[in-house]
Amino acid sequence: MERVVGTVVRGLRCPIINQGDNIEEIVVDSVLKASEVEGFTIQDKDIITLTESIVARAQGNYATIDHIAQDVQSKFGEETVGVIFPILSRNRFANCLRGIAKGAKKVVLMLSYPSDEVGNHLVDIDLLDEKGVNPWTDVLTEKQFRDHFGYIKHTFTGVDYIDYYKSLIEEFGVECEVIFSNNAKTILDYTKNVLTCDIHTRLRTKRILKANGGEKIYGLDDILSASINGSGYNEAYGLLGSNKSTEDSVKLFPRNCQPLVDKIQQILKEKTGKNVEVMVYGDGAFKDPVGKIWELADPVVSPAYTAGLDGTPNEVKLKYLADNNFADLRGEELKQAISEFITNKNEDLVGAMEAQGTTPRKLTDLIGSLSDLTSGSGDKGTPIVFIQGYFDNYTK
């Protein structure tokens, strides 16, 4: 019988993961159990994805705000620290900021506006137009910001992040000055010692600061890039990708994930005879139309994946073929023509009209977004996602 279903995505439940657990064994057992209970068969080119959170938990990759403070103090000493371009997130940045403040004498907090880099807004962009404020040229003090826009709470969290972040710094008796600018060089008028907290633009920001007189220039990826007194760490990303764990600690982005995904693939090959692809995923990308948030707070969507997930899709647009190449055909004749076109399509469709609108993003970014939306960020309890038929097309 002809197949009538394409890609199928299942969120799999598994035990709560704790430090020291054998995550390879748990993932494999969870997939095999789900296959048995739900009655599906594991096939070649199926995909298993597991959230970075359970990997980091199994690794015990945690650190306290004291560990953060020690690292910050060792890098900046008694200097005033410019903390620039943080995202607006209690989960992602609050404990990082507390640790930074605890290791500093004075903090100049510079916020981008109207929003942070992942789309959290401090102020509606229409208000900027109304007040005649240009976010690309205008530097605002805290008083000027308040005079223009007042006190604005975040759409979803109900938090005034200016007051909130300032209170976290002052909690440790540290002086805090807040300014608003989208130009990294602005902070150098206040201090030459800067901790830049942006995620995806951090390399450019560091380069600009160093080229314009910055002295001690670090990013969040430089904080806890090595263990501090036995703490967790991430040599590639430091504090980037961390989440709040307890009131005084964070869970870091997992490290050394490649052996993990390769091992899971190997074990499943031994148990099923099938070659299944495996990846660890963090934040995917989906722009919320209300809050305008993009997610993407992790430094990469996938820190590790098996070789079969490298690359980008090479797809043609079915509706383009139906409306253009085969506009005179209908029914079975149209189906056969499109199937034949797909079967014989070029290996590289970049620039081809038949591929327009397919947007060849990295496979791991696409699959990570699919997985992130499937597992959610709350209490679904499905940190493992099993995907079938992802590499199929209309001819399969």
Image (tube, rainbow, N blue to C red):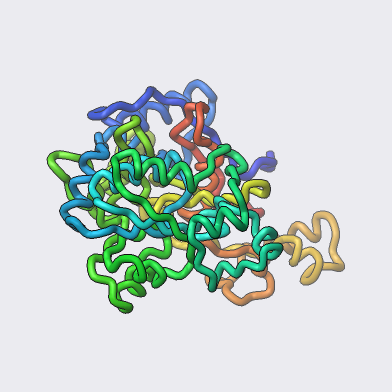
Q: Quadrant of the N terminus?
A: top right
Residue at left offset 68%, top offset 74%: 353
Foreground of the two, 43 or 142: 142
Is residue 181 in view? yes
Location of residue 281 by image quarter? top left
Does residue 116 appear to the left or right of 263 in the view shown? right
Return the x and y of residue 198 as percentages of the image width and height: 40, 58
Question: Whole-percent x and y of residue 29?
Answer: 36, 27
Q: Nearer the viewer, residue 297 or 371?
A: 297
Q: Position of residue 246 (x, y in %)?
A: 34, 30
Would residue 244 be found to the left or right of residue 11 on screen? left
341 lies left or right of 286: right
In percent of the image, x 36 and y 71: which residue is there? 189
* 149, 329: nearer the viewer: 149
242 left or right of 69? right
Does residue 257 appear anywhere in the picture? no
Q: Is residue 312 above or below residue 303?
A: below
